Amino acid sequence: MDTPGDTSAQVLLDLEALIKTHVANIDTGKSELKKLKEMLTSALENDETYRLHNEEAKKSAKQKAATKYQIIQQQQNRELDEKIKSLSTEIKELDTALSDYLREYARMSGTNEIETSDGEVREIVYVAKLVKKSSRAK
C-alpha cells in the first residue's frame, strides 16, 4: 500500500516528466519554426518586387523616424516624452509590487479573489514560465 508521501512523490515525478516533455516539444517546435521562417525570408528576399518594396519601406521608415525625432526635440514634446517614460517606469514598478502583494494576499487569505475599491471583484491569476538560468543573470 502506498503512503501519502509515496503518492505525492510519484505525482511530483510525473509532473516533472511532463514538464520536461513539454520543454522538449517547445524547443523542437521553435527549431522547426526558425527553419520555416528562414525559408520564407529567403523566398521573399529572392523576389525582385518584394525587395524593391522593402527598400522603399525602409527609406520611408527612416524618414518617419527622422521626422519623429525632430518633433520630439521641441521643448514641450520632449517634456511629454520624458513624462511618458517616467510614468511607464512607475507603472511597471507598481505592477511588480502589486504582483508581490497579491501573492501574499492569496497566501494569507486563502482566496484568489479580491474586491477593488470600485466594487469590482477581480481574480488573482499567476503566469509562470521557464527561463534558462544563464538568461536571467544577464
Image (spheres, rainbow, N blue to C red):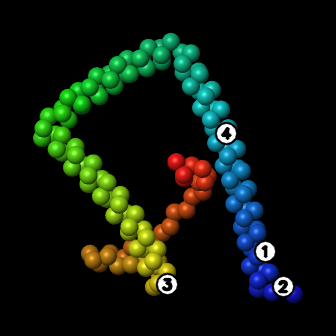
Local packing at callout 3 (Cα closer than 10 Å; few below 14, some 14-19, many 20+) is: few
Q: Please, what secondary structure does the residue beneath circle 1 have? A: helix
- Residue 29: image x %, image y %? 67, 44
The residue under label 2 is 2
- Please tell me which of labels 4 and 1 falls first in the chain: 1
Local packing at callout 1 (Cα closer than 10 Å; few below 14, some 14-19, many 20+) is: few
Cβ–Cβ under 8 Å for marks 2 and 4: no
Comparing 90 with 128, the one in front is 90
* Type of the residue with mark 4: Ser
Comparing 22 with 74, the one in front is 74
Give the residue furthest to the top. Answer: 48
Residue depicted at x 37% and y 17%: 56
Cβ–Cβ under 8 Å for marks 3 and 2: no
- Distance from disc 3 to disc 2, alpha carbons, whole Å, reads 29 Å
The residue under label 3 is 110
* Type of the residue with mark 2: Asp
The residue under label 1 is 10
Comparing 30 with 102, the one in front is 102
| For residue 7, side relative to residue 59 (left or right) | right
* Type of the residue with mark 3: Gly
Residue depicted at x 59% and y 21%: 43
Cβ–Cβ under 8 Å for marks 1 and 2: yes
